[in-house]
Image (tube, helix red, strand yellow):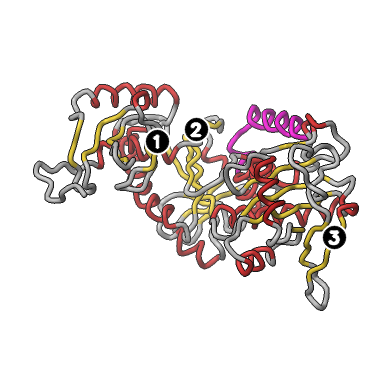
Amino acid sequence: MVIEYQEGIFSTRQEVKEVLQENTKNKEDRESEVKVADLEGKVIGLYFSANWYLPCRNFNEILVNVYDQIKTSTGSQFEVVFVSSDEDLNAFNSYHSLMPWLAIPFSDLESKKSLNRRFDVEGIPCLIILQPNKTKDGAEFRDGVDVIYRYGVSAFPFTEERLQELKREEKERYESQTLVNLLTNRDRDFLLRHPTLKQVPVNSLTGKTVGLYFTAQWCLPGVKFTLKLISIYHKIKEALLAENKDDDFEIVLVSSDRDQTEFDSHFNTMPWLALPFDDLIAKTLTKYFDIQGIPSLVILDPDGKTVTKQGRNLINLYQENAYPFTEAKVELLEKLMDEEAKNLPPVERHAGHRHEVTLVSEGSGGGPFICCDCDEQGSGWAYQCIECGYEVHPKCVRAVENDPITDA
């Protein structure tokens, strides 16, 4: 809430500013002013965001849905205050028109700067939860974005006690997790497979390693990764068949497509199974596995327990050799990669970059990165440009002896 903000005196009363701006939904569609006294006793979310940043717009849709549900169920016990980082008034008005909550006026730069300093906001979107009638130590909760993504409306009223309760419930679900209780509901115990969307019982996957593939046709990185995953999927299946092993591998599409037509077109390109379009289980799985971006690949073992949420990264790093994606297999692959790195040249000229690139490991300046050549994730060993930070997978380097491009 926003009342008489003074630097360093933001205590249980939450002084920020005297008047907030609200986009009311009356017939005149005018903006009205809301007294801070009207917010006393409520849980407040200070929402730092901007319309020019895609992650903010994506999160905004989720927050609107959660806000509406909380307001419907609890009445007036929750409010959000938008603290804008928009570039101009038109952008602010356009973005705020999508929000059913309050905002600090765009012209009030001093209050916005003071709030950013007070809460040490380093990135957006950011949601700071302020509790009413709490001591200073218990009044602030800074991980609102993560909590909304992970638990949604269930997290309200965002107290430490409620979050601990959700974590205990989550731990119990993980311990009792099976494919059947993850992928079925009272009305459906099957998945879809081509041709003609044949129904496949979920319990037929018991005993298989399963990848839950979160993606959508509108997601360009997802379209690109799907092509790679199809190839890897067939190679894993062929290898298991050739080795006459008892285990098997399957993938289940968890779609974020926008309509049935888009889903049908998307799923037609895939050789694996899928949840039906717009099945509520899809949203449940997204929250349960804390999926914050697509494409994402979660791997489950033959008992239905989670092996890793980093399936996409492991596919990019090790292709079909990543199977069965277990910690032991990854440790083995990392050791092999370390051995192979001993035979790589310490410096290369890459055809896709004008500077020399230097081989680095996670312990010598490397670590998680996005390959500038294939746009996919990487970790561990990389070729890195010391001058500008350009990084590529060692396998993506296209070495040239005489680089025709001279240094700028």
Give the CA separation, mark 3 to mark 1.
51 Å
In the drawing, what numbered circle is on residue 314? 1
In the rendered image, the residue lying farthest to the bottom is 28
| Mark 2 Cα-neighbour bin, 10 Å: few <14, some 14–19, many ≥20 | some
Question: Was residue 171 drawn as part of the magenta stretch in this picture?
Answer: yes
How far is mark 1 from mark 2, CA to CA? 9 Å
Q: Which residue is mark 3?
A: 34
Q: Is residue 105 left or right of residue 392?
A: right
Q: Indicate the position of residue 316 as horizontal and vertical percent values.
A: 36, 40
Around disc 1, counting alpha carbons within 10 Å, would you say few (fewer than 14), some (14 to 19), or many (20 or more)? Answer: many
On residue 308, which mark appears?
A: 2
The mark that comes first in sequence, 1 or 2, is 2
User: Which contiguous range is marked in magenta?
Assistant: 162-184
Residue 402 against residue 82 in the figure, above or below: above
Q: Earlier in the sequence, mark 3 or mark 1?
A: 3
Q: Which mark is residue 227?
A: none
Q: Nearer the viewer, residue 201 or 319?
A: 319
* Image coordinates for residue 346, horizontal then vertical, percent: 20, 29
